[in-house]
Amino acid sequence: MTGVAVFTVLLVLLPLVAIFGYLVYRGVGSINWAFLTQTPKPVGEPGGGMANAIVGSAFILGIASLLGVPIGVGAGIYLAEFGRHRFGDVIRFTADVLNGVPSIVIGIVAYSIVVLYQRHFSALAGGVALAIMMVPTITRTTEEMLLLVPQALREASYGLGIPRWRTTLSITLRTALSGVITGIMLAFARVAGETAPLLFTAFGNQYWNLRANQPTAALPLQIYVYANSPYDDWHRQAWAGSFVLIVLIVTAVAAVRFAVRRGTFGAA
Amino acid sequence: MANRAFRRPDMLRPQAVAQTKVTAAPVARTTPLLDATGGEFLDRIFRFAMLACGLAVLGVLALIVYELVLRSALSWHAFGFKFFVRRDWDPVNEQFGALPFVYGTLVSSLLALIIAVPLAVGVAVFTTEMCPRVLRGPLSFFVELLAAIPSVIYGLWAIFVLVPILTRYVDPVLSKTLGWTGLFAGPSFGYSMFAAGIILAIMIIPIISSIAREVLMVVPQHQREAALALGATRWEMIRIGVLRNARAGIMGAIILGLGRALGETMAVTMVIGNRPEIAKSLLAPGYTMASVLANEFSEATGNVYLSALIEIGLALFLVTIVVNALARLLVWTVTRGQPARARA
């Protein structure tokens, strides 16, 4: 039986090794300075790069964070500090269920509330879609981290006459801050690789764009378009883009793991 | 009476003693120790602001339901329930039937579960029961790393590695040996339901395995010890003492994996062939609900077309909500409300 279990583990790790290995093999060979600094060239011309997609992704993720992080952290604070009752359970369950909604459906909703009114695709719509995806994750991890702060710390603060809002913000949140930031980075890493919600919200762009109400290129989007194309050079660039994307995401995940292992809050 | 062993510095000087006022009761402070002006008012505002954020989470869900129902009303009025029973997807003549997509979603997810569940539960059992402690951390890290890979990169790898392997080596063998069942008959282009099932299986293994691992760890140690004390072998101990106890939780993990597989878009779109027809053979191309949304949404002409697509989105949403809620309830009954682990 142990042999069967070991065999299944090896079978599961096989695609992991295969994907990462092939990605590094194709990706490292394809990355060059032109890739990181140029915009896409017209179809058929070799060369060009994904610089606008890398920057565009960062731009859309910035908008998403601006919208999603405050709401997520606020909801997490509510659940941890004020929400230890039935209604809080309802919000908790809703957040868990929202985590499982397919990303393309969230893209449809963002299309419906932003694109249809603005009458054009925009980075803002993409940011709204990604923000909706970030909120449930950030809410749950913030709540978890705040619950880890010992009650004695809050009571000591109340004993000194500090009002509740000040206690929550300056003492409880401050103590749990590294854990909360861990949760935010986790949500960020998950959302950074999402393509489906951006398909008809940010839509993609062949040129530079840093205006929030214009279509914007995004790295996963560009990879998708290039992967489905019939041009070898575009396939090469898709691998390079995937390599950049996976390096960013794995760095974030590894940093999260490292931070968590060092302890969620300082000397308490 | 003053304690002679303890001399307060301000008592050493006699004039200090004469200057202290002796009152019958201490005077209450009227000013707070720290500057907490307006404390209660700001407390109320803070609580209201945090409540608003909490309500925003509920609001997001309500918004999703509202928008989907609103925009799909046109298609609902045009086709009614028959929308999910008809097979013809004809945008030119504005005839829409979603059965091929429903079939594709269900079959690809089922295939993914059949492949993924034994592997994921095997990994979970190995990690909790048989693995040397030193390897546990790195092993779980690697399995969760599989979950961190974006879906589009899975699709990219599938197009350039998985599909050629299937076309050249696997599909001909399957056709020859299992073709008589009808499941592996017909020509194979690689881009098929089978390829989609495999890539989906790879994607849902980490989810099933991490929740199964949590559930297995919650099984009390005395169950294992009792089984061993009765003379069970190692496998019997795992089967009787651990897996049987964690049955509900593992079922919840499987259903959660199903929920993820139902909604998966990009990797499936890139390998399933995108042909809106129902075929018995797994080697034939198919189409899923999420794929048709990804492919045709930004090019939908006409209000009925768009509305039909949004109705498919609504159906997908409802199915995944129900599946996820069921899974969460099952897992919660086993782990009894312990906070969900942050998953990458």
Image: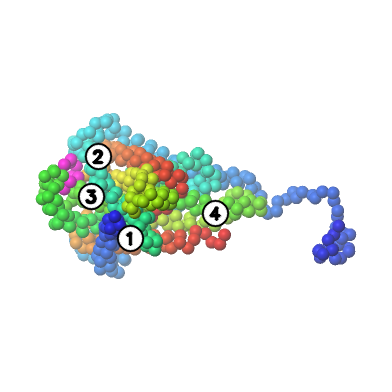
Asked whether residue A195 appears in the rendered view, the answer is: no
Task: Name the residue tied to disc 3.
Answer: B196
What element does badge 3 sit on? Answer: helix
Marked residue nearer the N-terminal end (3 or 2): 2
Q: Amino acid at mark 2?
A: Val
Asked whether residue A174 appears in the rendered view, the answer is: yes
- Is A249 magenta? The answer is no
Check chain identity for marks 3 and 2: say if they share one: yes
Query: Residue at (16%, 48%) from the top-left corner?
Result: B283
Q: Amino acid at mark 1?
A: Leu
Magenta stretch, main secondary structure, is loop
The N terminus of chain A is located in which quarter? bottom left
Q: CA distance from mark 1 to mark 3?
A: 23 Å
Front residue of A123/A159: it is A159
Dot 3: chain letter: B
Q: Which numbered marker is on residue B102? A: 2
What residue range appears in magenta? B274-286
What element does badge 1 sit on? Answer: helix
Task: Name the residue tied to disc 1.
Answer: A245
Instruction: Say few, some or many: other residues with alpha carbon within 10 Å of mark 3 (under 14 / 14 to 19 / 20 or more).
Output: many
